[in-house]
Image (cartoon, rainbow, N blue to C red):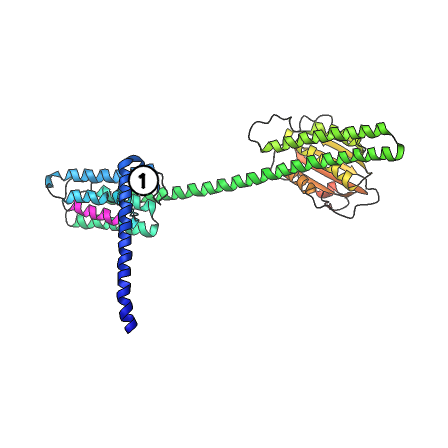
Amino acid sequence: MGVIGVSTPVREPRRVARACRRLVDGARRFGARVADFARQPVASFLRRVEELPFDYPPSVIIAVDAALLLVAVGSAIQRHNYFPSALPILAVLLTSAFGPMYAFLGAMPRPATLGLFAMAAEALFLVQPVSPDLAPFVLVAAAGEVSAIAGLRVSVPIAAAMMLELVLFDMYGNLSQGLPSYLVSIAFGWMAGVLLQYQRRFLYQERGYQDIRATQAADEERRRIAREVHDVIAHSLSVTLLHLTAARHALQTDREVDEAVESLTEAEQLGRQAMADIRRTVGLLDARPSKHAPEPGVEDIASLVGDFAKAGLQVRYVCAKDLRAVSPAVGLALYRIGQESLANVVKHAPGAAAFVQVAVDASSAILTVDNTVPGGLPAQRGAGMGVSGMVQRAELLGGRMVAGPFDGGWSVRVAIPLAPTRAGFACAPGNWMPHGGPAIREA
């Protein structure tokens, strides 16, 4: 008992001190807001509006509040015969109280409080009836404002209470003719606020979808650039290794210095070309117009095969006579797939002979890369992204690619439609790989 008797008087001064501190802090904030408004009234007002948590553009908030204030002032002017009565002036102050309270005191406007203030102002107006009367439109504007910032659980009861208020005043004869139109107007005002709120939600949802689509596009672009870099580097290293192997063989076996120098020169030129290709590929990240050479197409597969042949790969090339139907996108995909396939031959089957064929029919362009496998199929599979990248290239253009053992060797076959399509290429795997399903080998 003694402890309680001593501690109770101690806690009371602490509560008083905390209350005093809050009061002093509030007074300081009020003084700072008033001083800020006195220095820059327009900028300070717009800044306060932007700080509201309702997430509407300042122009919308200002327009709605101005409409509410304009209707209230018009209703007060209609009651000039009742002056010097203070009721209309008090009603106008109630409808416009939230602006100064928030601007100078920091009191956040609440939807329910806004509705109650509007109903109180309406009651003050209708105590002094006039005909015709603008006062019911105060409730129309307030119903729209409440429904635009509050949920249905709050806005529906408030709108119903506003309608009930008009019905009661009409029963006592304080409302001029037009009750049904006033009630419908309140319903339309409430509906306008709800539609505005849903429009804002749909806008945010669409922005979220746009962010998702932008992220997906960025991811796809990164994968595309990764495929380009992988293909360029794999091709360059494969052909360079062939040249270096030929140079080493010429020096160790035949002591042919000229042949070795020629191979090293070819390797050097290829390295420079690879650097240019890498610069062009990395340049895809730049938003400015590219100054580099155009991307390779189906016509460049011949020079690609020639590079591998010069480096020492036994390769034969057969091409369709007319390649005009092949679009640049399809041509680039076929070129990169052929490039990766020949690089895989050098990597996985040294000493093999390869066969490359490009065919064009009425609906698709078909690339075939076959190679022998000296000593049988390799036992180990790579862990790279070569085959998966080739499959993605084909599928992005609506095509299809298979790779696997075929006729004692290895075969990569891809068909891409000449016309853009989202559907996969309609070709049964058995027509491509008659010896069973393809066994995919990663590069």
| Stretch of the chain drawn in magenta | 115-127
**Place of residue 153 in the rendered image (x, y in percent of width and height, measured from the top left):** 33, 52
Question: Can I make out residue 211 in this image?
Answer: yes
Q: Is residue 60 left or right of residue 131?
A: right
For mark 1, give the secondary structure.
Answer: helix
Residue closer to the observer: 210 or 385: 385
Residue placed at 28% from the left, 73% from the top?
A: 2
Question: Hey, which quadrant is residue 80 in on the image?
Answer: top left
Residue placed at 78% from the left, 28% from the top?
A: 265
Image height check: is 284 above or below 126? above
**Place of residue 89 in the rendered image (x, y in percent of width and height, measured from the top left):** 16, 42
Of all residues shown, which one is farthest toward the bottom?
Answer: 1
**Place of residue 427 in the rendered image (x, y in percent of width and height, measured from the top left):** 69, 40
Q: Is residue 400 magenta?
A: no
Residue closer to the observer: 31 or 152: 31
Kindly identify the amino acid type of the residue bearing the numbered disc 1.
Answer: Ile
Q: Residues within 10 Å of mark 1 (few under 14, many from 20)?
A: some
Can you identify the residue that label 1 sits on? Answer: 61
Question: Can I make out residue 329 in this image?
Answer: no
Question: Hey, which quadrant is residue 363 in on the image?
Answer: top right
Residue placed at 35% from the left, 40% from the top?
A: 50
Residue placed at 28% from the left, 64% from the top?
A: 10
